[in-house]
Image (cartoon, coloured by chain):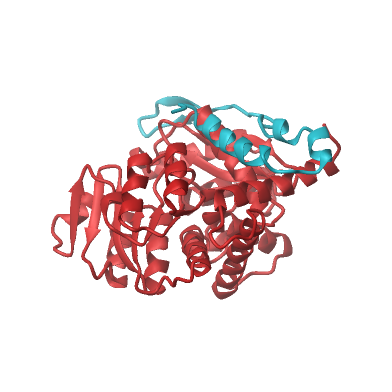
Amino acid sequence: MSHSLFQQAFDEIRTQVESEDFPASFERADVLERLRHPDRVIRFTVRWIDDEKKVHHTPA
Amino acid sequence: MQYCNAIGPYKGGLRFAPNVCEDEFLFLALEQCLKNALTGLPLGGGKGGARFRTSDHSRHEVLRFCQAFMDEYVRHGGADVDVPAGDIGVGSREIGWLYGRWAKLTGRHVGMLTGKPEELGGIPGRVEATGYGTVRFAMRMLERLDRQIDGLRVTVSGAGNVALYAAERAILEGARVLSLSNSKGTARFGDGGLTREQLDEIKEATAEGTRLEAFAQDRSWLEFAEGTTPWSIECDVALPCATQNELDEPDARLLAAGGTVVVAEGANMPSTAAAVAAMKESGVVLGPGKAANAGGVAVSGFEMIQNATRDPWTRKEVLERLDEVMDEIHERCVQHSGNGKRPDYVRGANVASFYRLGRAIVATGPN
């Protein structure tokens, strides 16, 4: 079994849509490939202070 | 994770949990894109969160964490850009604090988060929406097979909002709810099923942080079977409402052998790929999460409409419209899987949502 949850989800979608006849425009626009990658991944670090006044740096 | 905004602003839950990783967010965001497309509402797909276990921290620590999170997030979100909701570790209290910080930083009162407390523009019925919607979807699946939910035996996994409100709706529709569960084991109820009053007791206890196994200790009407899942209990309808990959191939075979007719997923991808294949092979009809649990995000969509129009909805309106949306999703799945007597909902859900996303992506130009 695949260990990547993303791969598991993407494979299901690919298997289902590959055997379906979609308009040719879908292929020209490469719809499936477009859905393989997110538009963007935003990362930031949350810096916060706990009750003992200690600073934490939590990656998000 | 801003995944795809072809049909609307990025939309998905914020998850605060200690073990979240990029793979999990990618999977959830992708599922969210298709699910949101399936609702028919103008909602794109996204997901986000942080490695933070809300329940490990004091009220003030959670407040400061939410504020610090928003201090960073503020530049990325907005009612027309990216509209998160709650998820694991992020309830209406946290959404309220996140929203309060946003309002303070921007000076604006707009629907840039959903799942808000009603005092801040939240919509009634949001908490129930996912679970209620999942049962509605299961009812439609049963009808297609000339069955009614009334009197049927239903097993539910999980003990969060999805599970509790799926159980509530199932009881309201006359079904016998035989189980709830958590990561430690399964709470089993007698053959007559859980009553509404007993469920209310469980809801109250879990809201205060009591776990099912502790709750079961001094009560005779339920038995907590440690280390088990609900899938060995004979049932007509199974509702996995806990977490991803909680139902594997042997579980699917057990369900089939026990005569289960319908499985409707309240959680996201609770069935492994092998379990999905086993159910298909053995004739158990499966309603996949991206269809069956779309009620939550649909009601989030209503909240966005409510905030944009400044015209509050009543709980009755919300629940009526929720059922309509679930029925529409069911219809789309049936249409896109060949209109058969026993529809392949997995296929229907994927194809229908891919159609909608694809048409929008084509319309924006291929880049």
Residue B306 picture quarter: bottom right
Q: Nearer the viewer, residue B206 or B194?
A: B194
| Image location (x, y in percent) of residue A52 | 35, 30
Q: Is residue B115 visible?
A: no
Q: Is residue B25 above or below residue B130?
A: above
**Residue at the spot 42% in from the left edge and 36% down from the top edge:** B17
Q: Is residue B201 left or right of residue B67?
A: left
**Residue at the spot 66% in from the left edge and 29% down from the top edge:** A37
Q: Is residue B321 visible?
A: yes
Q: Is residue A46 above or below residue B270?
A: above
| Image location (x, y in percent) of residue B243 | 41, 43
Q: Is residue B52 left or right of residue B342?
A: left
Q: Nearer the viewer, residue A25 or A51?
A: A25
Q: Quadrant of the N terminus of chain A?
A: top left
Q: Nearer the viewer, residue B127 or B281?
A: B281
**Residue at the spot 17% in from the left edge and 56% down from the top edge:** B223
Give the colour of chain A.
cyan
Give the colour of chain B.
red
| Image location (x, y in percent) of residue B45 | 65, 43
Q: Is residue A51 left or right of residue B300?
A: left
